[in-house]
Amino acid sequence: MLLRAIFWMAVVGLLMPLGTSAASCETGAHCSRALELLNDIRASGLHSLHQVRADIENAEQARAQRG
């Protein structure tokens, strides 16, 4: 878990624009690719979390049916 946290901190650190605010980054063309990449990472993470949640619920239902 510690390595995962370090990895994500490094990703965020690399993708954060230097010397610009988030508001100017949303409208600036120079940050659009970085924002798209962050949105893709966020969507992928949420998809993974939803998949894990579904797997846990399925395992709980299978246990309830057996026992």
Image (cartoon, rainbow, N blue to C red):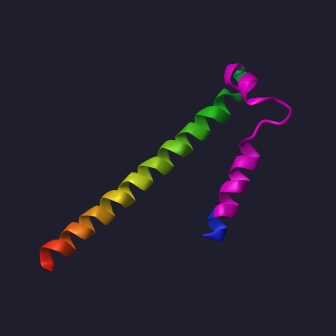
Residue 42: x percent and y percent? 54, 44
Image point 78% across, 36% down: which residue? 17
Q: Position of residue 44 (x, y in %)?
A: 48, 47
Q: Where is residue 16 in the image (x, y as percent from the top left)?
A: 75, 40
Q: In this view, does 2 lie to the left or right of 21?
A: left
In the displayed image of the protein, which residue is found farthest to the right?
Answer: 19
Compare residues 65 and 12 and report the one nearer the observer. Answer: 65
Instruction: Tell whether position 7 is magenta.
Output: yes
* Residue span colored magenta: 5-27
Q: In which quarter of the image is the C terminus?
A: bottom left
- The one nearer the camera, 7 or 64, is 64
Q: In this view, does 62 lie to the left or right of 22?
A: left
Q: Residue 36's quadrant in the figure?
A: top right
Question: How many tags in the picture?
Answer: 0
Predominant secondary structure in magenta? helix
Q: Which residue is drawn at 53% across and 40% down?
A: 40
Q: In this view, does 35 lie to the left or right of 64?
A: right
If the image is split into quadrants, where does the N terminus sit? bottom right
The quarter of the picture where residue 24 lies is top right
What residue do we see at 71% from left, 55% from top? 9
- Residue 20: say if magenta: yes
Position of 7 relative to 26 (above/below) = below
Residue, far bottom: 67
Can you give x and y, in whole percent of width and height, for residue 53 in the image? Answer: 36, 58
In the image, residue 40 sits, relative to residue 53, either above or below, namely: above
Say above or below: 25 vs 49. Answer: above
- Residue at 69 percent across and 19 percent down: it is 27
